Image (cartoon, rainbow, N blue to C red):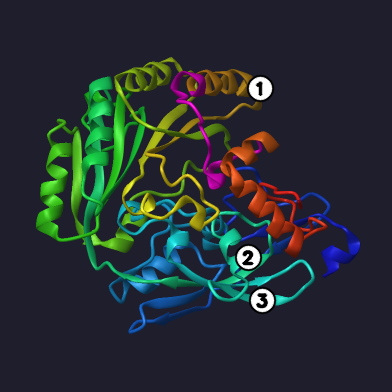
Amino acid sequence: MFAHETGLELAVRSGGHSLAGHGVTEGGIVLDLSGLKELEIDVPGRAAWAETGLTAGEYTAAVGAHGLATGFGDTGSVGIGGLTLGGGVGFLVRKYGLTIDDLLAAELVTADGELVHVDAETHPDLFWAIRGGGGNFGVATRFRYRLHEVETIVGGLLILPATPAVIESFAAEAEAAPDELSAIANVMVAPPMPFLPAEAHGKLVVLALVCYAGDAEAGERALAPFRALAPLADMIRSMAYPEMYRLFGDGPPGPAQEVTRSFFLDSVDAEAAEAIAGHLRASTAPMAVAQLRILGGAVARVPAEATAFAHRGRRVMATLGAVFERAGDRPEHEAWVTAFNDALRQGDAGVYVNFLGDEGEARVREAYPGPTWDRLAAVKHRYDPANLFRLNQNIASA
């Protein structure tokens, strides 16, 4: 209410991973939710109430102790608040869909200070909007999630030589795989990792994270086509699902600059694979990457109009990035990302809102194509006509 009365800019912070920096404000108010850590697990009912200061790793470890899981992203330190409101694309995406596909209910504080419970029956328009519409409609304090039985998975890290043929084949195999298998391919120059042969250091590789959520023997069969691509390192094994979040840290230590661009592709064909390899070799950034997340499966079986995430039919989500140290180098790396994006673009690019930086209103509209934008604007008008919640990928009141 204080922000409403004073007109001060309000930043809502869960895990602080906003690419656009929306978790902080200069001269305004930061509402830090990181102290909200309560988690109520209903094991027989296969559901959990989780406060939005929890991280994906904390939640996954706690429910994993019961052999259960909800699909989040691929980084354990990300807060569940912003991740869920934007959609949630991670290691279980093809098997169980987006995080919002397992969201059963939520509690929000609206712009007028009211705490409301929302679900499919209560405030259904608001429940539709928060499943993909971001933080435009209130401060989410608790979520109720569906839980799935996921005790052990077959997964981990597979590193392959990143020739254009391998890049194209990996994407094709990941799309053709059973829904139980979700894959994320990071194409990049290999750093000197101790488990890689020395001759691979500095060479272009596919650093792939794969997760098969099903029977172990079936998982080994599903992974055979990937292992046939002559891996440089094979660290795939049976493990408890929460271990997927412990495979890596959360990025390079210390301050760094970055330029990113995210969009959807309909295929990774030979031409796209050649472009990926060529542009990565041409980058002058200390770290440059093209990440490919294969969608389909459970994501595509939900109607586009069912939630505010309208990209159900898209097959691949691509993210291009350059990480560097000197701010003065930004124009060079922005030009590289723009040229790379232009080379890969296939028709209507679209964008996943959680991977959107500070890129302007036109790009926000790409996150919500067609009638999705109009419907979100109408919900915004009903619950936040004065646009109190504006430090986000903003949707103005209709």
Q: Nearer the viewer, mark 1 or mark 2?
A: 2
Please tell me which residue lies in front, 251 or 138. 138
Residue 266 % position (x, y): 38, 32
Residue numbers of the magenta segment: 341-359
Q: Residues at badges 1 and 2 in contact (C-beta under 8 Å)? A: no
Q: Which amino acid type is marked by label 3?
A: Val
Residue 35 lies within the magenta run: no
Residue 369 % position (x, y): 57, 41
Residue at mark 1: 328
Taking the spot 46% from the left edge, 18% from the top edge, the residue there is 343
- Is 388 displayed left or right of 130 in the figure? right
Q: Which amino acid type is marked by label 2?
A: Leu
Q: Residues at badges 2 and 3 in contact (C-beta under 8 Å)? A: yes
- Is 15 displayed left or right of 97 in the figure? right
Residue at mark 3: 116
Residue 126: give its label.
2
Q: Is residue 336 visible?
A: yes
Prevailing secondary structure of the magenta residues: loop
